[in-house]
Image: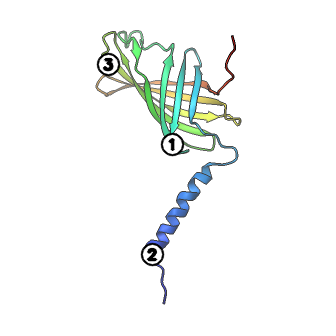
Amino acid sequence: MNQKSPILSISCVLVALALAAPAAVAQPNSCDLQGTWVGAIDGGGGFLSSYEGRTRLSGTLDLEWIEIPATIPGVFDDAVAFTQSKGVWRRSGPRSFVYTIFNYALDSDGNVVYALKTSGTKEISEDCKVAEITACLEYFDAVGEPLFCGGCGTATASRLEIGAACSP
């Protein structure tokens, strides 16, 4: 009597699931997050962010704030600049993603005044060129103890695309 090994059967099922997972996400109306995005924050300021993917499902991101003051009058008067933000992202739907980024606010001597964690969602348009973003801020002291939740806001970002070079 020829019996199949239970380990072989389980292995076949696991391989089938692993191959099917990306296909389930790669739907006809899906977008990838990878690339560089230029953003504007509702209420002022902006950012430049770059996303890299370990897979189509998750990856890392780098974000630079533009014209966003680190000083919060009456709370963090000594903060004058932010470090570059580093973070992670994960796909939550065909055109939606969740993310968390982290950075520090520094004083004029380069000492940490506070840390900032930003978490939220990104929903990309059907043409995959515009992202609507929510962001909720959480503040920490210089040693990482939670201080307070700073509220939530929204932003819009456009995918940076290769354009024709200008000619003088």
Q: Which mark is residue 23?
A: none
Q: Quadrant of residue 132?
A: top right
| Residue shown at 40% from the left, 20% from the top | 83
The reply, left or right, for residue 137 in relation to residue 143 is right
Label 2 neighbour load within 10 Å: few <14, some 14-19, many 20+: few
**Residue position marked by numbered label 2 in the rendering:** 6
Q: Amino acid at mark 2?
A: Pro
Where is residue 33 shown, x and y percent of the image? 58, 36
Q: Amino acid at mark 1?
A: Ser
In the foreground, 114 or 127: 127
**Residue position marked by numbered label 3 in the rendering:** 112
Q: Could you give the CA–CA distance between mark 1 and mark 2, rounded to whole angstroms?
A: 32 Å
Tell me whether circle 3 and circle 1 mark residues in contact (CB < 8 Å).
no
Q: Amino acid at mark 3?
A: Val
Tell me whether circle 3 and circle 2 mark residues in contact (CB < 8 Å).
no
Q: Earlier in the sequence, mark 1 or mark 2?
A: 2
**Residue position marked by numbered label 1 in the rendering:** 58
Where is residue 134 shown, x and y percent of the image? 56, 29
